[in-house]
Image (tube, rainbow, N blue to C red):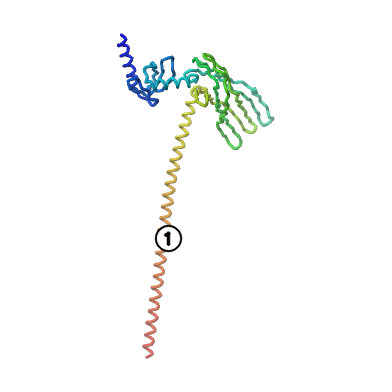
Amino acid sequence: MMIRSLLLATFLFSLLFSVSIQARTFYNSEGKSIEAELITLEGDVAVIKLSNGRISKVALDKFSTADQGYIKDWWQENKNRITGRDVRLTIRQKNRYTQKPVTKIIQNKGRVRTSESEFSYLCTLDNYSAKTVNGIKATFSVHKRVSKRDKNGSTSNVEIITNSMQLDLLESKGNLKFAADGVRCKDMKNTADDTSLRETIIGMELTLSVDGKEILTQSHPENFSRFLKEQEAREERKEIASDKREEKKDIADSKRESFGQGRKYEEEVERDKRKREAAEAVARRKAEEEAKRNKNKEKFKERQR
């Protein structure tokens, strides 16, 4: 029975080591290898991630002696480091008026309506691991759209307000509650001079990091990060298309310039040709007139004799 179990374990380990991904190469006692990502160490069992995303657990003594030493050293260095698999981040947006809507009547001109709101994000970080972690840094990036209209026309741009904070100690199996600084948005509409200002929050990204290494990035609303990536991709495509248009324009301008220079050269050659022909014609006419005069002179001398 023991032999069968050993053979089964060896077979499973060999099968496990037949998968290949781009990560560290590990070896078993028989010299067979696999490339995998080391996730954690649970007692005498190593947890690794395969290329297909599957998480597998392998007994530590199934690895080579060198890899066993590497895994133990890695664990001593990383056992207190938290990852995105250890925590869950919950984000809730909170809005409140810092100035309720007020309308001011301007006699015979119109009215002005103004208000101001503050947007903040209340966050809860739950730790499902046995690790106690200190030094977590939270970085907030709030994207605010500012739309204006005045006598010069309408404009719209996005401002990114970034702030960060150090979180308190995250206890094992515990949680932390924290919030970003509030971001204020103004809303104004003036019918007297047809001007307006509207500031709105379009989304927020929150990144958690420890010792400069990113643990987790999450957005509110949840699809905001995807929206930013899609927008970045659209801008990149626009830039590529613009570069192609500029390249085509440069080629066309170069061709036109080359054609223009060629045509100018041909015109200059033609002008020179016409000038030479005209000069030759004048020279021939002068020579003919000179010959005719000389002939008349000879005839006159003959008559005198």
Q: Secondary structure at mark 1?
A: helix
Task: Determine the residue located farthest toward the right in the rendered image.
Answer: 107
* Residue closer to the observer: 240 or 152: 240
Measuring from the top left, give residue 208's x and y in whole percent: 52, 23
Question: Mark 1 packing: few (<14 Cα in 10 Å), some, or many (20+)?
Answer: few
The amino acid beneath tag 1 is: Glu
Measuring from the top left, give residue 71's x and y in whole percent: 42, 21
Measuring from the top left, give residue 221's x and y in whole percent: 51, 22
Residue pictured at 39% horizontal, 86% vertical: 300
Numbered marks: total = 1
Image quadrant containing the C terminus: bottom left
Residue 98 in the image: above or below residue 289? above
**Residue 3: quadrant of the picture:** top left
Residue pictured at 40% horizontal, 25% vertical: 24
* Residue closer to the observer: 255 or 74: 74
Measuring from the top left, give residue 14's x and y in whole percent: 32, 19
* Residue closer to the observer: 197 or 261: 261
Residue pictured at 39% horizontal, 19% vertical: 54
Q: Is residue 33 left or right of residue 95?
A: left
Q: Which residue is mark 1?
A: 268
Image quadrant containing the N terminus: top left
